[in-house]
Structures are given as structure tokens and as C-alpha cells.
Amino acid sequence: MSTTPSKSEPAEASAGLPLFYQQPRPLIAERDAELSIGAIDDLGFAANTNSLPVVGAELPVACKHFPILFTTGPEPAMVALLGLRSGENLFVDAAGAWAPGVYMPAYLRRYPFIFMENSERGELTLCLDMAASCVGKAGNRLFEAGEPTDFTKAALDFCREYQSHFAFTADFITALREADLLVDNRADITMADGQKLSLGGFQVIDEARFNSLSAETFLDWRQRGWLPMVYCHLISTGNWAGLIDRAGARPA
């Protein structure tokens, strides 16, 4: 279950693996013939991250729920902000349930599957995080008679589609950097109880610089489908107030 790679996902610097993934390995029919995957009922593993990667195709919905920001560093990523403090996810409750009525980013919906690059063969292979709590539980079989089940095929299609959108988004972010549109930003927040928070380490699109793009560049971005992503990012800044309200309403 492989495909030709385009661009690789950013890895979590501290572990050398993508966020949440601890023991990803390729799926092999001979070895995993009896393996099943249960439902992920507990998202507690995501409760300590205050942002998740998002891709361009998600923005029309995601921009209604979260501030959409860009990480700093040599290879910025586009993320949905989920909390105002480090290690805080305001959309996962104490029972590990996602907030009802709130969009769940595809990065989280994809778990525990992921594409990993095989550098020797130049392919992306469907892998499974063997550390996920749902692995091995009664549920969806991964293989039947040596062939992938419909469940596994659906996971493969989802990961392949995600990878395509990730590559499209990476090209967009590269264009933002080359046009010098990403600027460092910080949020200084006063909670309802008077507590002051300061959140930094992220970038936003400078709207004035964007509006100063040449007509030629603007038309090129329109043809590439990048303009809606800019507008969704700008719209998403209205979600800071919702995060503050959600943080204030959460029990300490």
C-alpha cells in the first residue's frame, strides 16, 4: 500500500516523529492478517497539545472554529490553535471527548494511520501507530484473505488525499515566505478573572503586505487556488474571543 511521495510532513522535533505517533510501522498482510482496529473513544492523547496542523482544504470550515496561525522556524506549518497555554487543548474534555459541534482537524481524524516515506524505494507507505490504544481491539479487520479490507482501503484513500492537500498547502506556505508575507506575532490576553496570558512563537499573514501584492502575483495566486486560504486565515482571527471564553469556562 504505497504511493509516490510529493512532500513529507513536518516531524515533531523532540522525537523525530509526527505529533502523536510513537511506534508507526508499515502494514503487511502476512504479518497483520489477524490485526483489528477498534474505535478511538478516548482522545486524551491529544489533550496536551495546543495546536494541530491543518491543510488548505480544511480552512473554509476550520476558520469558523479556531485561529489559523503559522509556526515559526525555517519550515513553517499552518496550524489550528486549540489552547491559550502550552499543553492545553480546550476542545478535548476530561473524558477524552472532542467538543460537540466543533470541527475536528483531519490530522486527528487520520490517526492512527499515516503515510511514512521509504527513502530507498521513493514511496509513501501506509503505516499504523502500534502504540495507539485502539490497535488490537475488536472492530475493523485490516486484511481478509490476504487483501486489504474496505476499512483499510478507506484509510489508504484518506491518507493519500491528506498527503495531496499537505503538498498543496506546503507550496502555499513557501509562496507566503518568498513574498515576505509572514510576520511574527504575539497575543496578550486578559482573562475575565484578570489573569494575563501572553502567547507568542507564531506568525500571521501581514494583511497590508498582502494587499500590496502585484496584480500579476495576485492573479497567479488566484489561478493556483491560494487566495481563499489567505482570506480564511484572516477571517479566523475573529476566533480568539471564542478561545478566551472557552478557557474561562473550563474548570481549573
Image (tube, rainbow, N blue to C red):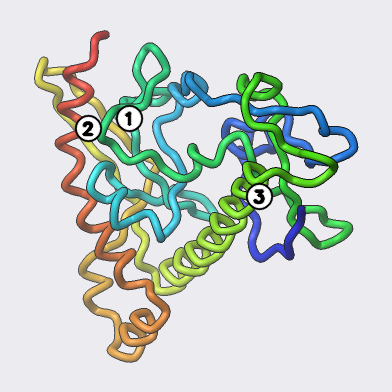
Mark 3, other Cα within 10 Å: few <14 / some 14–19 / many ≥20: some
Q: Is residue 28 above or below residue 78?
A: above
**Number of marks drawn:** 3
* Residue pictured at 44% horizontal, 40% vertical: 52
Instruction: Kindly state the secondary structure of the residue where label 3 is placed.
Output: helix
Q: Is residue 178 above or below residue 234?
A: below
Residue 163: image x %, image y %? Answer: 59, 57
Image check: 95 left or right of 111? left
Of labels 1 and 3, earlier in sequence is 1
* Circle 2/circle 3 CB separation < 8 Å: no
Instruction: Kindly state the secondary structure of the residue where label 2 is placed.
Output: helix
Instruction: Kindly state the secondary structure of the residue where label 1 is placed.
Output: loop
Q: CA distance from mark 1 to mark 3?
A: 34 Å
User: Could you say which quadrant of the image residue 91 lies in?
Assistant: top left
Of labels 2 and 1, earlier in sequence is 1
In the picture of the structure, the residue carrying the numbered disc 2 is 243
Q: CA distance from mark 2 to mark 1?
A: 7 Å
Q: CA distance from mark 2 to mark 3?
A: 37 Å
Q: Residue furthest top?
A: 252
Mark 2, other Cα within 10 Å: few <14 / some 14–19 / many ≥20: many
In the picture of the structure, the residue carrying the numbered disc 3 is 153
* Residue pictured at 43% horizontal, 22% vertical: 47
**What amino acid does circle 2 point to?**
Leu
Of labels 2 and 3, earlier in sequence is 3
Between 32 and 88, the one lying in front of the other is 32
* Circle 2/circle 1 CB separation < 8 Å: yes
* Residue pictured at 38% horizontal, 54% vertical: 58
Q: Is residue 250 above or below residue 146?
A: above
